[in-house]
Amino acid sequence: MLIKNDEKINGFLFVAVLPFLLFAMAYYGFESSYVRLKTMEKAPDFMFSSVYAYRVIPNYLSIHVTEAVTFMVNNYVPFLKNFLLKQGTLFYHSIFLINSFFFVLSSVVLNSLLKLNPTGVPLHLNIRRMIHLLAVFFIVIAQYVPTNCDSIAIFFYLLGALLTLKYLENRKRIYFILLCLVVFVSTLARESSCLNISFFAAMCIDFEKLKSKDFTFIKEIVLLVIAFVIPYAGLRMMIHQNVSFVEGVYFLDNFSSPFNLSGLLFGILSLYFSYLLCDEKGQVIIRKYLFFAIPYLIMIAMVGLFWETRLFLPLILTGIVTAAHQFKNVIPQQRDS
């Protein structure tokens, strides 16, 4: 019993406490030169008059969590106010709380993903923790561009990936229904929710079977597309005053700026690293995933900035998870924690 309790404590320290401390270091140990979020007193106006206006969940949380933090500080811990304001505005602390909460949840989901054992041989605990830590570091590094939506989007993406693998493992409809719900809700947070469809398609579709007119899983993919399109189109019909679909077109900037080119190289090399760690089957999955993610990649090139490496995180995490699964064939079994 004592050993089991120690394992649970160690698991909690590694999955929740260590990632939270790394995240706090990113927000308070050094200051981003990219976004001046620390000096903003409230949610900036552009969040409600640009493409960010469609990200209603992060915007809602930004407003109400800031109000709650302000109320708590002014009424219950006023002696901490001066100290907190030296480290950033109450709005900045609120963004940190929101992002760290969903970041820790992402770490928990990632741990569950790495625990999956479709081959019947669980991933060795030490290897699993090394891979988990690598994924956590990638997420933390990308926080030099702090936003109010990325941690939420990453959580939903990893949750969708977990539900996809659960569904493929036992074909229980409840997992697919939950996956559709995750895609629907996460579209209210960020448009990258479409990548859950790409992941599902990469895991399910066999191009050779399609040639022989085997359309298994096509119905499920259509349902996932509907779960994405309904909130995506609905938001753009409901929110239309003074709101643009994109911030700007940055295609030329992406391929002329040294910063953007270095961000692109970071994304390519990071995914290529995990690709090399995969077995042949894993490499096929990543190639299919990139094929189905072409619309997302085009949008990054057109209206995103490569220097914002956070945009590549879903792809990088997919590569890491895919590479991790093939380790099960070569690493001896060890007691889980």
Image (cartoon, rainbow, N blue to C red):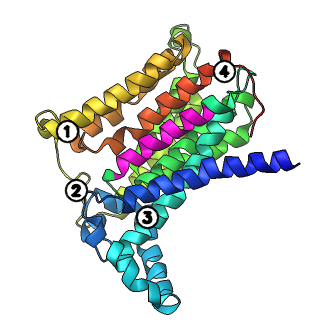
**Mark 4–mark 2 distance (CA, rounded to whole Å):** 41 Å
Residue 134 shows in the view: yes
Q: Is residue 19 left or right of residue 250?
A: right
Circle 4: residue type = Lys
**Mark 1–mark 2 distance (CA, rounded to whole Å):** 15 Å
Can you give x and y, in whole percent of width and height, for residue 328 in the image? 66, 21
According to the image, label 2 marks what residue? 33
Kindly state the secondary structure of the residue where label 4 is placed. helix
**Mark 1–mark 3 distance (CA, rounded to whole Å):** 26 Å
Can you give x and y, in whole percent of width and height, for residue 306 in the image? 25, 39
Residue at point 11% right, 36% down? 252
Kindly state the secondary structure of the residue where label 1 is placed. helix
Majority secondary structure of magenta residues: helix
The residue carrying pointer 3 sits among few (fewer than 14), some (14 to 19) or many (20 or more) residues within 10 Å by Cα, namely some
Kindly state the secondary structure of the residue where label 2 is placed. loop
According to the image, label 1 marks what residue? 260
**Mark 3–mark 2 distance (CA, rounded to whole Å):** 17 Å
Circle 2: residue type = Ser
Which image quadrant is residue 54 in? bottom left
Of the numbered discs 4 and 1, the one sitting upstream in the chain is: 1
Circle 3: residue type = Phe
According to the image, label 4 marks what residue? 328
The residue range painted magenta reads 128-143
User: Would residue 75 be counted in the magenta stretch?
Assistant: no
According to the image, label 3 marks what residue? 96
In front of the other: 213 or 200: 200
Of the numbered discs 1 and 2, the one sitting upstream in the chain is: 2
Residue at point 21% right, 39% down? 302
C-beta proximity under 8 Å, tags 1 and 2: no
